Amino acid sequence: MRLEVFRRLYVLRIFNCFPLCYLLYFLLFLALVLGACTQQEAKMGEQLKQVAKQTLAEQQIAQFDLEFLLGGEHGLEAEEVLVKYDHTLKHEQNYLAYPFSKVFDYLLASGDYDWITSSDPSKILITYKCVDGYNASTTLDKALSQESYIAFTDLTSESEAWTGRMASKMPPFYLVWEEVPYDDHSLLWPYGLSNLTLTPYEAAYATIMPKENLEGFKLYETHCLKCHSLNKVGGVMGPEFNYPRNILSYWEADNMWAFLNDPKSFRYNSKMPAITYLERAQFDEIVKYLKELDQMPRDPS
Ligand code: HEC
């Protein structure tokens, strides 16, 4: 009975406003199709984004432009830091800086970096890239072993961001550590710091990792690689030492040792800082490693 009434009403409506009804049906249909389309589009956009993120994560390279990321809004609070012994300036110095651990958390929050957060930090290589070609790397556990600071102003002068003889070399950033003894050379103090790159250790050093002379490799990595690349891996402040020719094929080890300790005794205007803290036995390990590298395939990608 009720159904009968309903049907009559329905039919009546259709007949009473015949054209309007079709228009309404048509609009409803259009809305449904459009809705489905935009949903599909959003889904595809999301899928594309996922693929892009996945590819980056699969390549496992995270690159951060510090000037860009710290130049805008970020909510990080700058702190005054007293550096007891600045390893570049060789004296005490005050800076305005961001704590590195906070910057690091901020950077990781900006994307999909599960492969970093879920890895053993000693297996991740962090590279500090500087505007002058200095390109120093260390493992993430070392970089986070004590608090470092990304300094952007030294507090010696009120009017200028950077003062003193290094003023032009410090910007945009300078990485400092609060309390590192003068004879501890294991931590990096990159100035002119502009970029950070993170990548798995094994992948980064695939073409220069020795089979035998690991000790020599470690020493080279700590003391030379930041300026002297091997197979194009490492810094470019000094000359490359293996590609296309290995340095030991045209420099004698004894001369290298003498140069290392006193570059200006070879060239009055040498740009290489004297490195006097290595033992001869340590240098010999480096030489062994470089000889092994000479026998390995050269594969600079
Ligand atoms: C801070 C950067 C820096 C570091 C670290 C560094 N060097 Fe150098 N080195 C240079 C520069 C720059 C030159 C370019 C030549 C010059 O200015 O005399 C150079 C040149 C050399 C040369 C002369 C090569 C040539 O063909 O002219 C040797 C040998 C050398 N370095 C060995 C080493 C060794 C071994 C280590 C590590 C124990 C090392 N250097 C660490 C910057 C560096």
Image (cartoon, rainbow, N blue to C red):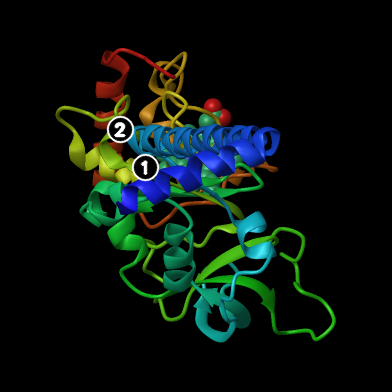
Q: Is residue 60 above or below residue 104?
A: above
Q: Residue 179 at what x, y percent from top left?
A: 42, 81
Residue at left offset 47%, top offset 26%: 232
Q: Which is nearer the eye, 18 or 77? A: 18
Circle 1: residue type? Thr
| SS class, disc 2 | helix
Q: CA distance from mark 1 to mark 2?
A: 7 Å
On the image, numbered disc 1 is attached to which residue?
Answer: 199
Q: Quadrant of residue 105?
A: bottom left
On the image, numbered disc 2 is attached to which residue?
Answer: 203
Q: Decide: marks 1, 2 in contact (CB < 8 A)? A: yes
Q: Is residue 272 visible?
A: yes
Q: Which is nearer the eye, 67 or 266? A: 67
Q: Is residue 299 above or below residue 235?
A: above
Instruction: Please state if 89 lies on the left or on the right of 56 as rendered.
Output: right
Q: Which is nearer the eye, 132 or 44? A: 44
Instruction: Please state if 181 lies on the left or on the right of 97 as rendered.
Output: left
Instruction: Please state if 128 lies on the left or on the right of 116 as rendered.
Output: right
Residue at left offset 40%, top offset 16%: 249
Q: Alpha-carbon neighbours of circle 2 within 10 Å: few (<14), some, or many (≥20)?
A: some
Q: Quadrant of the C terminus?
A: top left
Circle 2: residue type? Ala
Return the residue found at the far front.
Answer: 1
Q: Residue 18 at what x, y percent from top left?
A: 65, 34
Residue at left offset 48%, top offset 57%: 110
Q: Residue 252 at what x, y percent from top left?
A: 40, 25
